[in-house]
Amino acid sequence: MVYKGIGVRFVYIHGEVTTPPPPGTQLQMAMNIQVNGPPEVMEELVNVPFTITVSSIPPSISITIRGLLAIQATSDDVKRVSSQLKSGTVPPEVQAIITQYAVFEAGLVARELGIPPTIPLPMAQQQPQQRGPPTAI
């Protein structure tokens, strides 16, 4: 399915450090994504409200993000997506879009809170410097 347009708008962002993580402790992050409430449906547009909650184990931080996913599509696709959402099933493409934006935004909020990335970043290997004869200009 091809959408005419997709937009994500965040309407609420909250992040807090409840207790500083103990030194040397590896934080495990748990993310919960919910599509809450019925979608707002127009002729070729559907607005999907969602909430993302991120928490750590041990309990140290919490992040909550609420927003709307706006999908512009043909009226048939809008009817299909809205009927699936009303029946309680989230279409995989809607779940993927919300997850993609949510993980990025939650990562930014965690970074602002001073929480180190949960995915280890690759370290660049330094090449040993080889000394050769000096060159003349």
Image: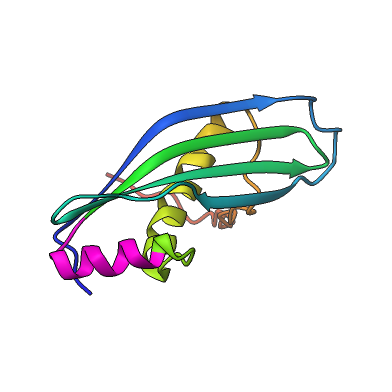
Residue lying farthest bottom?
A: 1
The answer to which quarter of the image holds residue 125 is bottom right
The answer to whether any part of residue 58 appears in the image is: yes
| Image vertical order of residue 56 relative to residue 125, above or below | above
Pinpoint residue 87: horizontal percent, then vertical percent.
Answer: 45, 66
Pinpoint residue 73: horizontal percent, then vertical percent.
Answer: 16, 62
Query: Image check: 5 left or right of 55?
Result: left
Pinpoint residue 38: horizontal percent, then vertical percent.
Answer: 40, 50
The answer to which quarter of the image holds residue 81 is bottom left
Give the magenta part as a residue range. 72-84
Q: Is residue 83 magenta?
A: yes
| Image vertical order of residue 124 relative to residue 83, above or below | above
Pinpoint residue 95: horizontal percent, then vertical percent.
Answer: 44, 61
For the point 70% across and 25% down, the residue is 17
For the point 38% across and 58% down, the residue is 97
Quadrant for the C terminus, please: top left
| Image vertical order of residue 12 relative to residue 3, above or below | above
Query: Image check: 91 left or right of 58?
Result: left
